[in-house]
Image (spheres, grey):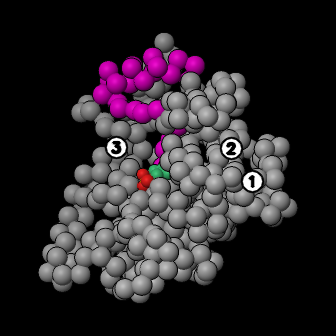
Amino acid sequence: MKEIPFVNPGLQYEGLREEILDIFDRISLSGNYVLGSELQAFEQNFANFCGTSFAIGVGNGSDALTFSMLGLGIGPGDEVITAPNSFVASAWTIANIGAKPVFVDVGQDFNLDPSLIEKAITPKTKALMPVHLTGRVAKMDQIKDIAKANDLFIVEDAAQSVGASFGTQRSGSFGDSGCFSLHPLKNLHVHGDGGIITTNNEVLYTKILKMRNHGLKNRNECEFWGWNSRLDEIQAAIANLKLDYLEAWNERYLEIAKFYIKELDEYLLVPKYEQIEKPVYHRFIVQHEERDDLKEFLQNKGVMTAINYPLPLHLHEASKPYGYQRGDFPVAEDQASKILSLPIYPELEDFQIEFVVKCVKEFCKL
Ligand SMILES: *Cc1c(COP(=O)(O)O)cnc(C)c1O
């Protein structure tokens, strides 16, 4: 058996090569490389896909979070509640606008535990940032109720959940804004960095349009000092092309996840999703007491895995100023010691996922 890589974006490119080369050629010859019709078309289609009024392409998912919070008026002295098991960008984007990340422990779904949120709210709390980790939407019905009762904004970190739904709505359509990354490792990705923000708030929308483009309100006049963080025409066109395939790809993610769940349920802890949700399984994470041994065992068999993420956010050196300690978020910490992400991407063949399952079973039977 040839090695099964943990991710393999090149395989997706192989399938779309002709179309992407055409895009590159067409846009290169046009001479319009930033803020043109390709971006507008993608923004429109992406907003439709998510079920929001507007979408704004930006340079990356972290800027999507940053601009959303700044655009909502969040800044120094404010607190934003998020999950301690996320990627570091969920925390540093809060910190770098001068606000304080406040963590709340997660549940078995790897998402914010709604029953713990209210205890963490203070007079300084301005927003909740649920992270739809692994491609599963957080419990947005309860989270929306809490936000409403406490007059808080919701900024969804939807970087891992493009296309995932909860009830009748897609991720990115629940909050004041939805923040997506188009990084090469995400389900919908461009060939480099990229990000996109969804919102139904027209005031926020027009503000972020200026923020991403130096703060300019027209070619020559700056309304406020902004940033340069735009989704290039070539990247937007690639994203727009891939958006046509996304639902089929996400179906394949779910199919692989279902296979893993069915086959591995009795061997180790697998994620179980509920009726009300439709996940996109950006990551498929199992849990095992001897995670490191399992990882090594699989690696020796040629099955590459990852740990997303080994160190909870409150235990990073950068979190020191907040005074958190080990033990503060027992569920996230316990999961961090047991989690292992198995390979999952649409291009994986059945014989490969069967091999992954066979190897995991072999280890668990030892
Ligand atoms: C990828 C990711 C981000 C950051 O996106 P970039 O495009 O890399 O800036 C933020 N949050 C989560 C949960 C992510 O997975």
- Please identify the quarter of the rendering in which residue 157 is found: bottom right
Q: Residues within 10 Å of mark 2 (few under 14, many from 20)?
A: many
Please state if 192 lies on the left or on the right of 327 as rendered: left
Amino acid identity at mark 1: Thr
Amino acid identity at mark 3: Val
Q: How many marks?
A: 3
Tag 1 and tag 2, C-beta contact below 8 Å: yes
Q: Which residue lies under the disc numbered 2?
A: 102
Q: Is residue 5 above or below residue 71?
A: above
For mark 1, give the secondary structure.
Answer: strand
Which of 79 and 162 lies nearest the eye of the viewer? 79
Please state if 230 lies on the left or on the right of 114 as rendered: left
Q: Residues within 10 Å of mark 1 (few under 14, many from 20)?
A: many
How far apart are the two marked residues, 1 and 2, measured between alpha carbons?
Answer: 9 Å
For mark 3, give the secondary structure.
Answer: loop
Q: Which residue lies under the disc numbered 3?
A: 7
In the image, which disc is placed on residue 125? 1
Q: Which residues are magenta?
A: 278-307
